[in-house]
Amino acid sequence: MRVRWSGSFISMVLSLALTVSACGNDAEPSSAAVVTEPTSAVATTTTPATTAAPVATTSTTTVSTTTPVAPTSTTTALEEPTTTTTAAPTTTVAPEVAALSLRPDGVGRYRFGSAIIPVIDALVAVLGDPISDAAWEYPTEFGEGRLDAFGDFSFPYEFGRQTCFANEFCVEAGGPESSEMTFVGWTQSEGPESLVTTLGITIGSVWSDNARVMSVDEGGCLSFGTGASGGIDLQLQSSGALFSAPDGSGGYTIGEPEPADVMVVGLSAGDLRTFMYGDC
């Protein structure tokens, strides 16, 4: 049977023989070789263990890396201004909401008689898409105006269009043809972010706070009355005494509400689509 020796084993034997030959003693060199070199080898092998030490450092670094969760929260905080910056352009769309002041002859820089399409487009750019946009025909002559087919509403023009937005601001258009309508009137009812007149009157304005620029008509319909400010018509409501009350004989008694109880609930100007059958 042939035994095959590995090259490393033969090299080790030759190395041992040379050591014995040089020292002339079989036991000590053998012992020195076995003890010293393996110890040296172990020391050499242990040296990489020093390299293992960074494992702890690596582990510590990993913990450190995990700790900066706070910067993530800082980054999140930084994202909020970004959102604000993105939203900012909506306040710079021309004309701005602040520029849409209510006037007796129009709104902002748009006057009655202007083509209605550019007016609506400009309002959409500021107020958003309309919540309603309807057109009607008024075929029947009635006094100085006209009536719709059912006789329920009157309007000064044969064709009309009403476009309303989420803040309850509506514009009226009218003309002799559906293709020739112009901006003829507007109304502002109770709604969020109501537009304001050039004199500072808007939904919620109180008579006592604006007596210098408001006038109130005598009489009215129960708790509702009318008034004016700078050529703009006002619809008013009293939370106290009534503007008028039935007298028990078929008539009405005129009331005198306190100015502090009278608040603006509607504003309007120009030609409007009007309901023919009011309560009073």
Image: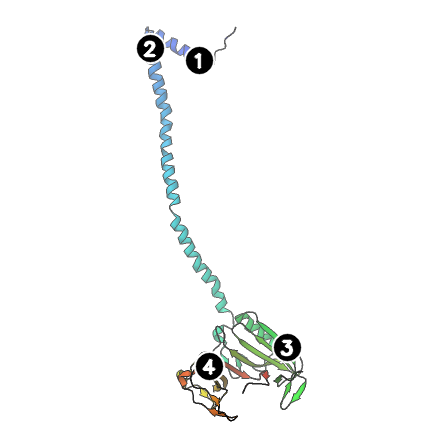
Q: Position of residue 143 (x, y in %)?
A: 63, 91
Whichever of labels 1 and 4 marks the residue nearer the N terminus, that label is: 1
Nearest the viewer among 87 and 11 is 87
Q: Nearer the viewer, mark 3 or mark 4?
A: 4
Whichever of labels 3 and 1 marks the residue nearer the N terminus, that label is: 1
Helix, strand or loop under label 4: strand
Helix, strand or loop under label 2: helix
Whichever of labels 3 and 4 marks the residue nearer the N terminus, that label is: 3
Q: Is residue 11 visible?
A: yes
* Tag 2 near tag 3, CB within 8 Å: no
The residue type indicated by label 4 comes to: Val
Q: To which residue does mark 3 refer?
A: 135
The residue type indicated by label 3 comes to: Ala
Q: Position of residue 141 (x, y in %)?
A: 66, 88
Q: To which residue does mark 4 refer?
A: 264
As drawn, the label of residue 272 is none
Nearest the viewer among 75 and 252 is 252
Q: Disc 1 to disc 2, how far (Cα)? A: 18 Å
* Tag 1 near tag 2, CB within 8 Å: no
Nearest the viewer among 170 and 38 is 170
Q: To which residue does mark 1 refer?
A: 9
As drawn, 31 above or below 230: above
Q: Disc 3 to disc 4, how far (Cα)? A: 28 Å
Q: Disc 3 to disc 1, how far (Cα)? A: 106 Å
Whichever of labels 2 and 3 marks the residue nearer the N terminus, that label is: 2
Q: Position of residue 166 (x, y in %)?
A: 53, 72
- View extreme (front): residue: 248
Q: To which residue does mark 2 refer?
A: 29
The residue type indicated by label 2 comes to: Pro
Q: Nearer the viewer, mark 1 or mark 4?
A: 4
111 lies left or right of 20: right
Q: Residues within 10 Å of mark 3 (few under 14, many from 20)?
A: few
